Amino acid sequence: MAETEGKFDFAIDRGGTFTDVFARLPDGRERVLKLLSRDPQNYKDAPTEGIRRVLEEETGQPFPREQPVETSLIGWIRMGTTVATNALLEREGERTALLVTKGFKDLLHIGTQARPKLFDLEVSVPDVLYEEVIEVDERIILRQDGCQLPRKDPKRSTGDSLEVWKELDLAQVEKDLRGVLSRGITSLAVLLLHSYTWSDHEKAVGALARSLGFTQVSLSSEVMPMVRAVPRGYTVCADAYLTPKIHQYLKGFTSGFKGGLKDVDVLFMQSDGGLTPMEHFCGSRAILSGPAGGVVGYAITSYSQMENKPVIGFDMGGTSTDVSRYAGHYEHVFEASTAGVTLQAPQLDINTVAAGGGSRLFFRSGMFVVGPESAGAHPGPACYRKGGPLTVTDANLALGRLLPSFFPKIFGPGENEPLSMEETMKHFNYLTEEINLFFTLPNSPEMSVEEVAMGFIRVANEAMCRPIRALTQAKGHDTSQHVLACFGGAGGQHACAIARALGMKTVFIHKYSGVLSAYGLALADVVEEVQEPCSLKYAQHCFSELDRRVEQLSKRCHDTLCARGFSSSQITTEVFLHLRYEGTDCALMITAAGHPSSSQSCRAGDFHSAFTERYLKEFGFTILDRPIVVDDIRVRGCGKSGIKSIIYNIHKPIVYLWEELPCGHSIQGPAIIIDKNSTILVEPCCEARLTEGGDVCLTVGSDPHCALGTELNTVQLSIFSHRFMSIAEQMGRVLQRTSISTNIKERLDFSCAVFGPDGGLVSNAPHIPVHLGAMQETVQYQIKSLGSKLREGDVILSNHPCAGGSHLPDLTVITPVFRKGVSGAVFFVASRGHHADIGGITPGSMPPHSTSLQQEGAVFMSFKIVTRGVFQEEAVTEALMAPAKYPDCSGTRNLHDNLSDLRAQVAANQRGSQLVGELIESYGLDVVQAYMGYIQSNAELAVRDMLRDFARCRRQQTGLLEVESEDFMDDGTPIRLRVQINEEQGSAVFDFTGTGTEVLGNCNAPRAITLSALIYCLRCMVGQDIPLNQGCLAPIKVIIPPGSILQPSQNAAVVGGNVLTSQRVVDVIFRAFEMCAASQGCMNNISFGSEKIGYYETVAGGAGAGPSWNGRSGVHSHMTNTRITDPEILEKRYPVILEQFSLRPGSGGKGKYCGGDGVIRKLFFPQPLLWGEDGAAGLNLLHRADGRLLNLGAKTSVSLEPGDMFCLYTPGGGGFGREDDTNSKPQKRRRLNETFLERGSVFEYRMAQEGV
């Protein structure tokens, strides 16, 4: 890169509200500037205006605003921008068409088929980005060794063997493309199945489209050549949708300069933390352009290479907070969601959580709640003088942590007034009065405004701590062994409290913390990345091919950076391999840094050692003798071009204060430190020092102990709610890390929970609907069954339906928590995980035609799996093999995974027991148990309020306080419900008397299933986030007749009750309360396999409509939220070809609001399979290879021959209201930025867990 000495260099972060400018002047001085991103009365473009002001003020020469800026004095410009993110949020991208393989026109509408918010009856999913779809009658398939159909000439690419089953008809494609062009659409996204490995068809379509006049053509094989059609499809659509908008912005930006910045080096920040030339900046790589600069900034300025102390980045802005981690290298993810769009591209792992300065404050059912709703930039917090609500910013202002005199006068309708303390205090006075009225207990002290404001700050801090713990502990790191690097306008006010809560001792705040994203751009490198798929084993016989391809990709990176003006000495390349154990889905992007090559490795490094070392750290084990597969090869080239930043040792006592304070000066808290861009709060027992570089280093002392009594403190109630939930979450992370099976480690089919001494649920996370209330029944059964026989060191295993089980593969492990000096358990912790096989008559232990419990696998009632600390391996092995003694049954078919996962569940419980013990050490047993009761009472209160509101409305409409409903199973078995509500008490009796008797098949549902369905329905009807615990059922009396399908006998088959009957129970409850129409009413279970392989899936249908909404099409509803296997993964790993996966038009019910449509899923089998089955569905057809068409009915098991095709037509959802009362007004589409949108690996983990 050319030197720019004697010129002005600019690094600019254009955010949604403010634009930050960092300028390096010709004499070496540095300047920072902050201005509004949009101020049309004064300037057209904020970055241009920032450059103009600096040039004018520093040179003393006029640079007229109305004329293009002279560029002779500019060396380089580096920018990060939210243009792409805003266009995605606002859905204001280019009009786009999607061209996709025939049979998959609705693939991106269905997506993973999981709904984003588990308890929202109105399934609200962001719109797809394309306006029209063209289906192309072409097909590439992966060649399968067992295929017994005629073979075609194979194609080879990236290690896969392929066949062209259907050639591309370019003449028809041209006709379709011309039609799209005629309707004014000029941007095209192309997604053809398996194009990641063989791109000829996509390239032919791309060349044709460009020749016809499409101005933007994005090919999925070029944008991101990685397996998995759905995220690749979202990514290519985002590229086609956003890139023209970026080019439009760049055209406007460059027009503000003479010559269009032709002779100026202009670079833009990409989502992966690297810079790229302006002409290569594209939509799919631009989403995190703004936040990425901040990560680079704190990474380079805060990380001490001498001590290798890892850093947590904490960027608290107006709407949200960004959390990330740096430990010597940038942590990337390769698939993450933003604004409802999953992007498959390298991006920094930046976790956005709902707790920014603009997060709203609520008091709900006796609990302080912060967010996730945000006041946004408009109207903003109450103190902005625009009629906004109370926010975290207002709480800081009320406590004197923000000083209005230090803020510019840019508030109010005329944007010329200071922050308003009066508005803030007026709102807080109202809220404080409401809180004090709620707690009208004798001798109960009233809270002051300051106490209320401080309470919300503490709750906000605890909410921000949870994702930081999750981010670090998920990868096996100790949170307390990190430095907290704080930046962003609001972060300094919370840094000490956050660090103290997490056990951190040091906080680092750079002198440019208020504009660190812009400063990071000045420090960043230019990056060129290339990646290609690979299907090779990481083994000696493949190393020569791996070396050849790595060398080829490295040369491409090097040549590209050389062409951009870098010398070879400025260029470094780093090789990554995307590795996984064969037979698993858990792939890690691995660098061999620190693992030099040897004779047993490829030339780029010892990736085997690097992979096993990281796998062991993240997951707690390795899989010996299992081959390692290379999914992708990635090379990242860096051209070193950033300005140099001096790194100071942040642990020396030579730390802190800003402008007027000399280096080395120290301040003891409490104190406030302010500069023009940020405010720092130094809390009591903390010390702030100014480093020699002008940065602030905070040393965090321990919190002075304040004794907490057993009486209710409403602020502590919210904090304890977070603490209990955090225990359950951390248990889940340990279970996921240490388990070995695909079901638990990768599908995340488990739940962890904390229970009180009576077995009542305290906290349950993450939320799998069918587990919600069931585990409480299991724990309470063990208390009744074993009672005083339980000793410290004992752990219980149970799965029997009569002991609170759901179905047998769900194994529950329960650990009592004891306290010295206390007789009996003081708490219980438990984990429930779905084991892939526990024996029975079919592989997978989910038989379609079981008639007794013994046919479904191993049974545990109250089995001590650990006795006095000793794992009972021999006894549990014998129990898992016991089903073999029954006719046609087998013992478990995967004993190794069963034992490994059971040990993982025991380890997760041990972690939960440890965390409960630490909580008791901090507060005392009586206090912890008291707040456990308060949290349960809080959930009870929310349910009682909901029942009272419903009863009042019902009484006014009908004069009755009783509702009832009825529905039927496929065999005619009725499910009847009568609900009697007591309006005064806010209680209800749910009476299922009249429900049909136990059935001979397996659709019987244990009592625990009905309770889980009931808790799910109550949470949906409450309509707000409440603790899901025992309190939800406290106002409810449930009557279920013994011997019915909802409370069958001890040996009844139950596997279908979990996946089918549970859905009918939910529909019956919602029908009684008139909440919404029935959804598809089942889970559409399909499985197929042979003696060697087995596959199981649940398939989406239509969601029911409601009083004000149409039902969503092609989505899972209620008691399931399972993600569907991606089409390319399905065909890559199983002997099947997916011919069609699309919506089933017209299958949704009609009404004022229409039900959602079901889906069509056609599976073609090229080789024989021994068994297959599916659950109750709208229509199940089998096309035999000999031409026969068979209707399979609702539930069956058949043998499949080569050439057979199974067609599943799933049900739609019911309509709501009379059809003649048509909904003439189209529903208003909600803007995505009206609701908070999280992102990052912690968010993706939670979505994956809720998508089980």
Image: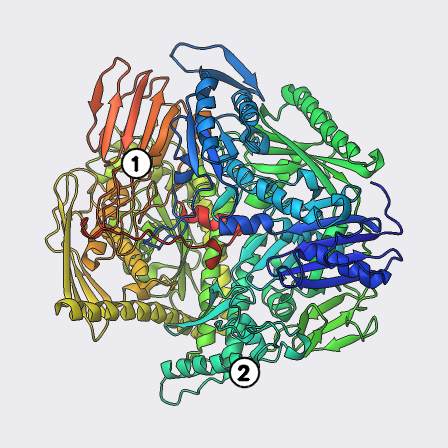
Query: Crowding at label 2, few (<14), some or many (≥20) Cα neighbours within 10 Å?
Result: few
Q: Which residue is at the far front?
A: 66
Residue displayed at 73% across by 30% down: 597
Q: Position of residue 824 (x, y in %)?
A: 38, 66
Residue under circle 2?
422
The residues tagged by marks 2 and 1 sit, at their Cα atoms, a distance apart of 59 Å
Which of discs 2 and 1 lies nearer the camera? The answer is 2
**Residue 886 occupies quadrant:** top left
Residue visible at 28% across and 36% down?
1145
The N terminus sits in image quarter: top right
User: In terms of secondary structure, where does tag 1 sit?
Assistant: strand
Pick whichever, 615 or 334, lies toward us: 334
The amino acid marked with disc number 1 is Asn
State left or right for residue 543 relative to residue 999. right
In the rendered view, would you say 292 is above or below 1034? Answer: above
CB contact under 8 Å: marks 2 and 1: no
Q: Position of residue 548 (x, y in %)?
A: 70, 21
Q: Do we see residue 410 in this rendering?
A: yes
Q: Is residue 82 above or below residue 343?
A: below
Residue 131 at what x, y percent from top left? 44, 39
Tell me: residue 577, above or below residue 761: above
- Nearer the observer, 64 or 116: 64
Quadrant of the frame with the C terminus = top left
Q: Nearer the viewer, residue 75 or 728?
A: 75
The label on residue 1085 is: 1
Q: Element at badge 2?
A: helix
Labels 2 and 1: the sequence-earlier one: 2
Q: Residue furthest bottom?
A: 443
* Amino acid found under the numbered disc labelled 2: Glu
State whether residue 820 appears in this view: no
